[in-house]
Amino acid sequence: MSEITFLPVLLWSDVLIWLLVLAALALGFLSSRNPLLRAAWQRVGRSRPGMAAATVLLFFLIAGLLDSIHYRPQLPGREAGQPPAYAVEVLSLLDAAASPLRTRSEKTYSEPLATRAYAKEAIELREADGSVRQMRDFPRLTFGGAHLQGDEARHDADIVNRALRAEALACALWAAFAAACACLLARRRGCPVHEMARALLRGETDFAWTSVLSTLAVLLLLLLPIAALCVDYHVFGTDKVGQDVLYQVLKSVRTALVIGLVTTLVTLPLAILLGIFAGYFRGRVDDLIQYLYTTLSSIPGVLLIAAAVLMMQVIIDTHPQWFATAAERADLRLLALCFILGLTSWTSLCRLLRGETLKLRELEYIQAAHAFGVSDLRIIIRHILPNLMHIVIIALVMDFSSLVLAEAVLSYVGIGVDPIMFSFGNMINNARMEMAREPMVWWSLAAAFVFMFALVLAANLLADAVRDAFDPRQAGAA
Amino acid sequence: MLAYLVRRLLYAIPILIGVNLITFALFFIVNTPDDMARMQLGVKRVTAEAIAKWKVERGYDKPLFINAQAAGAGVLTDTIFFAKSARMFVGDFGRAEDGRDIAREIRTRMGPSLAIALPTFILGLMVTISFALLLAFFRASPLDFWGVVLCVALMSISGLFYIIGGQFLISKLWRLVPISGYSGGLDAWKFLILPVLIGIVSGIGSSARWYRTIFLEEINKDYVRTARAKGLSELAVLFGHVLRNAMIPILTGVVVVIPLLFMGSLLTESFFGIPGLGSYTIDAINAQDFAVVRAMVFIGSVLYIVGLMLTDISYTFVDPRIRFE
Amino acid sequence: MTIVRLACLSLFILLASCSSEQNDPYPASERGKNILYAAFTERPKHLDPAQSYTEDEYTFTEQIYEPPLQYHYLKRPYTLIAATADTVPVPRYFDAKGKALTADAPTEDIARSVYEIRIRPGIRYQPHPAFAVDDAGKPLYIDNDRGKLRGIATIADFAHSGSRELVADDYIYEIKRLAHPRLHSPIFGMMAGRIVGLKELGAALQRAAQDQPEETWLDLDRFALEGVTRVDRYTLRITLAGKYPQFVYWLAMPFFAPVPREVDRFYSQPGMAEKNLTLDWYPVGTGPYMLTENNPNSRMVLARNPNFHAETYPCEGEAGDRAAGLLADCGKALPLIDRAIFSREKESIPYWNKFLQGYYDASGISSDSFDQAVRLNVSGDVQLSEEMRERGIRLLTSVRPSTYYMGFNMLDPVVGSRDGVGEQRSVKLRQALSIAIDQEEFISIFMNGRGVAAMSPLPPGIFGYRQGEAGIDPVVYDWVDGKAKRKPVEAARKLLAEAGWPDGRDAKTGAPLVLNLDTTSGGMGDKSHVDWLTRQFGKLDIQLVVRATDFNRFQEKLRKGAVQLYFLGWNADYPDPENFFFLLAGAESKVAHGGENTSNYASPEFDRLFAEMKDMDSGQQRLAIISRMNRLLQQDAPWIFGFHPTSYTLGHAWLHNRKPTDVGNNSLKYQRIDVALREAQRRAWNEPVLWPLAVGVLVLLSVVLPAFVSYRRRERGTARS
């Protein structure tokens, strides 16, 4: 009988993330049945930048989803008859996959791909006669390039060698994937494979396969060497306490995704409900809802967030018994931050939906349905809600990037995610001090910058494509 | 018009009361009077009597909202909420927890905030609108495409990076302007160049892209085609017709922020050591100075409401067809 | 857009052409003047001597106010010398019947100690409107009201000012102010237990303050203070209950600086406080400097006090001071610098860069944020980088009289001793943790080596600190090769196994040992600290949960004793072992008595020794008791002794006479600037780099020109078609 060696942990944000995945699947299903939405998605599929961005986002998403399945490993050294004990540390599948990155900590800073520490240190050498001699040198890293052992001269050759092999593998993988694509597409269309391949290369397909494939090529060429090197080197260096920066960046992705997606998700029902009610019922209801969102939006955002974050902090601090692990506490704080950010951002969506509903309810067929005595709820669900979907989808994708950027600023002010949580904001906040060091420690900031930029840029490009495809006004303009 | 404005003003009162209630409730859950006393009295050697004394002196020993002991109107007025919040409606912001007069502090800090925010706003608007017009003029050309890509790239960079990078390059490596600091009067210009520049560059991406879409929308309208058919030069069309008609959507987004310029920018001010309202707010958040934060929230809300009204008024200037009844 | 950009650029170029120091943050008119430039990070909350109690504030207050005593600038260990007094007072002791006792009388016999302080005649206050008098000798600004204050925004707006001689009454007035109900002096509670009659005065003042309207002046001279009396114009007598040898240290702190009655009256006039015209904002003193500009949001300016009494630079110091050039100015009249301009610098990167550019003469007393930015080099020890040495930057270090520790809450069932797992187990657990947490590595990673690992609560430089083998913590260290060497982790694991948690698991139930560390988010709560600590606890397979909270919440938890482990530090008020050991005295228990003993450590043996030690004069006998106390603490391990931070300041080559002091902050008057060198260096270091501007113009042109050409082409095209 096999024993369970881990304790699954379901964090609240995990629940929401997987709910989000379900919702996305449901939306996909609904879209495929609704001709209008299907057409819109097809327009998205035709957008080259949009599809290139989607490909990049897919990679981020995979990292984020892997990081959203959590468990507590069992502690070793259990004797017979004792109940199993689990570590207080909560790990995720991503941690398991990246466990060399997670566990191989140096003492302190080291440069990307270095084999020695970034600064000289006093090293004690014991002479033959037993006396102790001190000398200053760059100490060898415990893990970075450890496989080279004494042969550090091989360092450059080893890296080039590994990188080249990885590139070759990337080319092969890409070729295989492209061929598979061509075959599948050819079969679906019933045309010869080589014709399909030519169409793919020339970008003559309806769906922007060319940009997907070329983005994939670039990503593979970039990521595989990193993957090949990160096993034995610290590709992006290590930070103050010697932790691998690549690992931190990977872990930050989930935080960014949660902030960007869950925030909109948790406030969406509120915005939709109130927006439609205000527009549909007008009168007192409208006044009340307008009052609510005008009041909320007239409080300066940062201050509202600061107050709410501090308040939540107090609540969390006064109820330590709610959390078995630090991860759960950090997670709740993250979620609370999402709610709070949502609190300040739902008002604009609500206003948009209200305006649109006001217009819709005057339409003849809805007036007619009204006259026939169809219930309000039914009208809202059958006729109004579907016609608002494009606004909701646009808002969802448009908010993503600004929320990710907002997290960085809030963490700087000290009212962002939990300080022990990996996030781009925390990374920047810790790293900006390192810019003042002599010599400068630049890699943490650079890594955070590159990954954050890639994520937000991809999100922005996809958002553009989605907006162009869904917004009837935009369709003509662009 | 006047009647409309009066109504808007009256409408503002319940909103401000709401704002006050929300912030008051939020901050009092966070910060009990005990906490405030400890924060102000320091860490070393604080006794319970000292805290009790501090609370009595600052009026924090009263009940929060309803004073059951008091007689008559005192039930409502002899409370912390009334004493600390309601007085703000008549412009009395009281004192910060360290005993300094808030209104006076706000007056002295307004100048530096505006010195940064106004040039950033005006120059930023000019630069972004001209950039957007340029893109609109060269629409569907490589210049347009790369311009939009540039915009998207610019807006994908966190504001923190602009500040860190700008300070590093321009002040540290190239030594062109002081890294931080501020001085009143005419000497201020050399301190302002960098933050203003960074402010403009960091805002260019999103606004220029947005203005461009607005312009393109206008360009595709019939009257523009008519104008062009009349033989007007492209520039005349852009400036004479497109810009004018695109003003309404631009104004909607822009005018509302003008009054908020007073509030300053939290990040810029603290990175560049500018003694404005933004850094005042950050200090207050860090020091958990409830009185200051409450005052800033109140002012922010008032300014926001003023901004909404200004937006409405500005419509009538741009488009004489709009009338409020 | 083009026009705007071009305008901007031409502005840059214009600016570049007019001088070499484009980035000079100060007005050009200040160049070449004898002005010291420094920065401050936290705006001082209080400048009133009865209230100010932090180092940020002392940077200013100690230059302005003169308490009767001061520390010798150069001598170490710190030595008290007279400032405005003529000598350091020696207490006289009396028993309960009023009979005089000798200095070596047993402590329990001493009922009163009397300090008689004689002030030197002829010392004068800085010019101030509160002293301004008309021809008849009547104060000028005594009946201000809001109307008269209309045109006045700062203290400089008063047309007249005056001065007067310092007298003993001014000191008495300030001591009474410690009991002032509106001032909340942080030491009132403590002093009320020492100075005879201060407590009663506090109660009387409280009653009086309630009876009179808020805005009126509470004349303290109407109230008597039994323990503080005026002997003659220049002499005051302070009577303390019992023996309190540490009292002289307090006499060197601004709490005991003189405040003239007329100043208090002046600032108490209606309408003054609204304009920030308070002693808290515009201090008045006899010190070498006076505050001429107070804008805590951006800058504070200290200027030489024209009335400063004669004081000369010391001629003797510690060994090595002469070689360091610290005695070169022997006998010169102080102060040596005309003005000191302190600019507010909240962000550490600009602060650091401005220092490197020569726009700050020295880094401030290492405040937290500066500490983080200034990585002298990435290595773990205090050394200047090559480049900085070439620039002539000098590094000054000294161990500060402070200690950082990770405390165990002794009321906790697991790590504490009382009940729960039992005394034996928890002591071993605490000892094991003391060994496992590698303070040396902490110092090297997080403090760049700027600290020494602590062996006991006492930092070096405090009486009772012992170097060498006798001073090490035998529980945690071995003495190997003439050095203290941390015991191996195996020793800790062994202790832990003996405590009943082999491999971090309860020997009986197999449950893992989970410990909670409470800390503030800014302190140990940041990510890198947490990672590091988790690794340290991981050495023993102990699971660590770090609970970071905001400061208030943390304090509240300490008050309630709702912590297990916590991280704290203590800065000494005065250099005496009593000021460290009282943090562990049973009578100071946080939970029981609201004191400073946050660990709630209560050992009858320790308390007995503490009571014996605290009122003793420093000597062999005291040293022996202190050693016994240290051994006790090391065995019981209520704290994991952390480290004593080394304060370091960096100074440029042109700034002379700097010696790190940690107890006296009135060091400004001793410093000297070589202005010519500063000018030359600043010019050399701040040559602007102009090519980026040229590149910028080129890039702009390369975009604009093709655009213009294609515009012309298109226009022509439409014209033709």
Image (spheres, grey):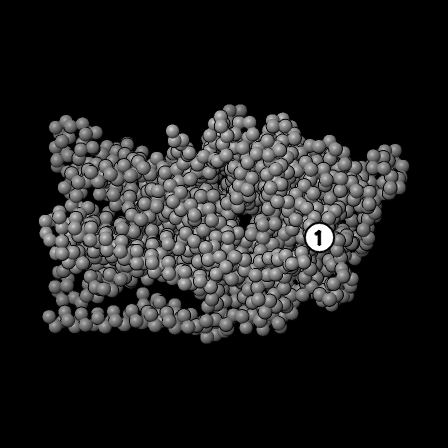
The image position of residue C577, as x and y in percent, is 73, 44
- Relative to B152, is C289 on the left or the right? right
* Nearest to the observer: residue C578 or residue B321: C578
Q: Mark 1, chain letter? A: C
Q: Residue at x 63, y 52 (%)?
A: C451
- Amino acid beneath label 1: Gly
The image position of residue A146, as x and y in percent, is 47, 55
Answer above or below: position of B147 versus B262: below
* Nearest to the observer: residue A470 or residue C382: C382
- Relative to C613, is C687 on the left or the right? left
Q: SS for tag 1?
A: loop
Q: Does residue C618 appear anywhere in the picture?
A: yes
Answer above or below: position of B233 versus C282: below
Image quadrant occupied by the C terminus of chain A: bottom left
- Identify residue for label 1: C482
Q: Residue at x 69, y 32 (%)?
A: C602
Image quadrant occupied by the N terminus of chain A: top left
* Nearest to the observer: residue C480 or residue C260: C480
Residue pushed farthest front?
Answer: A128
The image position of residue C682, as x and y in percent, is 56, 70
Q: Residues within 10 Å of mark 1 (few under 14, many from 20)?
A: few
Residue A213 occupies quadrant: bottom left
* Nearest to the observer: residue C3 or residue B142: B142
